[in-house]
């Protein structure tokens, strides 16, 4: 070992002084550089982990919001479909009511027309009977050659009408 020390010119005192200096430099680096650096890196790691957790939570909330939005859209579509179907049903119902009302009005007009025609028919028959009666009276006057009084006229008219 002596030879090794002489060959490489190693000085024990200098080696020990260098070891002490290296220890001091190592302590100073650890204390003032490495420790704060480790603390900053640990803080940064925690911040990144928290950010990742927040991102996962936000992503979960976003997915839930999208699902809720899709449910709301689906529900709105169902509601719109129900409203449209209700409107169609109501429209058909109103159309049927309108048709029924129009039919009733047509029936009423027809009934009124029939009634009016019947009244006119009866009036015409009455008028025809009156004219026939007058004709019978005139024919009777010509046949008999004389005018019969009002009482006899009325009886003749009644008899003639009874025969018709």
Image: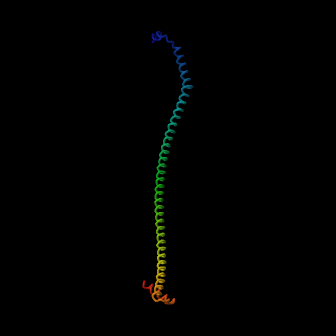
Which quadrant: the C terminus?
Answer: bottom left
Residue in the picture at 47% in, 51% down: 77
Given residues 162 and 15, the one toward you in this image is 162
Relative to residue 103, is residue 73 depicted above or below?
above
Count how many numbered circles sit on residues in the image.
Answer: 0
Given residues 116 and 82, the one toward you in this image is 116
Relative to residue 148, is residue 50 depicted above or below?
above
Residue in the picture at 53% in, 16% down: 18
Relative to residue 86, is residue 47 depicted above or below?
above
Residue in the picture at 49% in, 89% down: 146
Given residues 45 and 107, the one toward you in this image is 107
Relative to residue 3, is residue 23 depicted above or below?
below
Q: Position of residue 13 (x, y in %)?
A: 53, 14
Q: Position of residue 125 (x, y in %)?
A: 46, 79
Q: How is the image coloured?
A: rainbow
Q: Residue furthest left?
A: 163
Q: Position of residue 45 (x, y in %)?
A: 51, 33
Q: Position of residue 74 (x, y in %)?
A: 46, 49
Which quadrant: the N terminus?
Answer: top left
Given residues 59 and 25, the one toward you in this image is 59
């Amino acid at each position: 070992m002596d030879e090794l020390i002489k060959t490489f010119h190693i000085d024990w005192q200098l080696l020990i002084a260098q070891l002490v200096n290296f220890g001091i430099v190592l302590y100073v680096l650890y204390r003032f550089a490495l420790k704060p650096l480790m603390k900053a890196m640990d803080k940064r790691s925690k911040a990144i982990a928290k950010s990742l957790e927040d991102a996962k939570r936000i992503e979960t909330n976003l997915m839930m919001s999208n699902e809720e939005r899709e449910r709301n859209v689906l529900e709105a579509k169902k509601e719109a479909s129900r409203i449209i179907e209700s409107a169609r049903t109501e429209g058909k119902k109103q159309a049927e009511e309108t048709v029924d009302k129009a039919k009733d009005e047509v029936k009423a007009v027809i009934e009124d027309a029939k009634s009016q025609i019947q009244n006119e028919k009866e009036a015409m028959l009455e008028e025809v009977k009156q004219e026939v009666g007058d004709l019978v009276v005139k024919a009777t006057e010509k046949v008999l050659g004389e005018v019969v009084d009002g009482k006899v006229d009325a009886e003749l008219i009644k008899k003639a009408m009874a025969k018709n």
